[in-house]
Amino acid sequence: MDIGDVREVTAGDCSDLYYLDTGMYETGGYGAVYILNDDRPAIVETGIGTNHDLILDALAELDIDPADIEVVTMTHIHLDHAGGAGFLAEACPNADICIPAAGASLLADPGKLVAGTKNAVGDQWQFYVEPKPISEDRIVELEDGDAIDLGDHELRVHDAPGHAFHQVVFEDPANDAVFTGDAAGIWIPDREEIVETSPPSDFDLEQCLEDVELLAEIDPDVLLYTHFGPRYVGNDAERVLEEYATVLTEWVSAVEGTRAELDADEDVMAHFASATEKGEAWNEQKASAEAAMNVRGVIGYLDNRE
């Protein structure tokens, strides 16, 4: 799958669902955006904003007029999920911009969000653009237990705040699928590997493990990862999610152990940035930056735990 390509999601019994590779961080196979072509067409996740034109190209390929999009939503307001929302609000003038309530104000006035993102992602900021503010009269705030009615499909909202206090996941019962945000980790389809995500500043291991249990209780046939793509799990959802819980727990333990051995937190970040093997799946620059960011998130968690 090349950057900009649009594919129908055929996993399980999914229908009316498509995804595209947005080329996030100039990296293929990392950032997906989903389009549900229902009575009320919807875009789920919005990317970092830099390549929002690829989303509009995807709509054209699917013969969907941007003016017909009725819902633009995201699992949380980290800018790799919400950075394109303001651009899409302009391009899709009739869409409700449905945002988890805990983070909605930060997309209406994104100054603090930008500052926090720059601090979290470091040199990766070069791949972003400044997000456009979203008018408050366009925003629909989402609470746990809400449902976005699209026609044949609905998106049921479940709070999942372990990765970030403003994260939700969306359950689509008609497709027996869940848009996981970052609650189920990062899926590398070419390697069939699930890996950790633990960015600053809200990462909380115990809450992440509770979020994994929530997903297991929903028991979907298909996991729709933002990073990256659909994954059919069928009757193995519980096992797959337990695998991620193990990956995440072992990752935190590895960072904690290495931190006890080295003199400075910068050395811990450098150690994992140089040791990562994910460059084979993405590229060396992205893989190293991702590892360092995830270490910083764990260090913050460990400090707060104490």
Image (cartoon, rainbow, N blue to C red):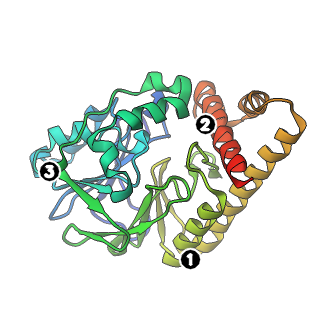
CA distance for labels 1 and 3:
42 Å
Number of numbered discs on residues? 3
The residue at the point 82 percent across, 39 percent down is 259
Q: Secondary structure at mark 3?
A: helix
Q: Which of the pair 67/260 is nearer the observer?
A: 260
Say whether residue 177 is visible. yes
The disc label shown at residue 235, or none: 1
Badge 3 or badge 2: first in the primary sequence? 3
The disc label shown at residue 9, or none: none
Instruction: Give x and y (percent) for residue 62.
Output: 20, 48
User: Is the residue under label 2 in contact with that under label 3 (CB below 8 Å)?
Assistant: no
Q: Is residue 219 left or right of residue 204?
A: left
Q: Is residue 151 above or below residue 45?
A: below
Is the residue marked by circle 2 packed among few (<14), some (14-19), or many (20+) residues within 10 Å?
some
User: At label 1, which amino acid type do we have?
Assistant: Asn
Of discs 3 and 2, which sits in the foreground? 3
Q: Is residue 157 above or below residue 70?
A: below
The residue at the point 38 percent across, 56 percent down is 102
Of discs 1 and 3, which sits in the foreground? 3
Badge 2 or badge 1: first in the primary sequence? 1
Q: Is residue 140 left or right of residue 276?
A: left
Instruction: Give x and y (percent) for residue 169.
Output: 43, 62
Instruction: Give x and y (percent) for residue 57.
Output: 23, 37
User: At label 2, which amino acid type do we have?
Assistant: Ala
Badge 1 or badge 3: first in the primary sequence? 3
Q: Secondary structure at mark 1?
A: helix
Q: Which residue is mark 3?
A: 137
Q: Residue furthest right?
A: 261
Q: Which residue is mark 2?
A: 281
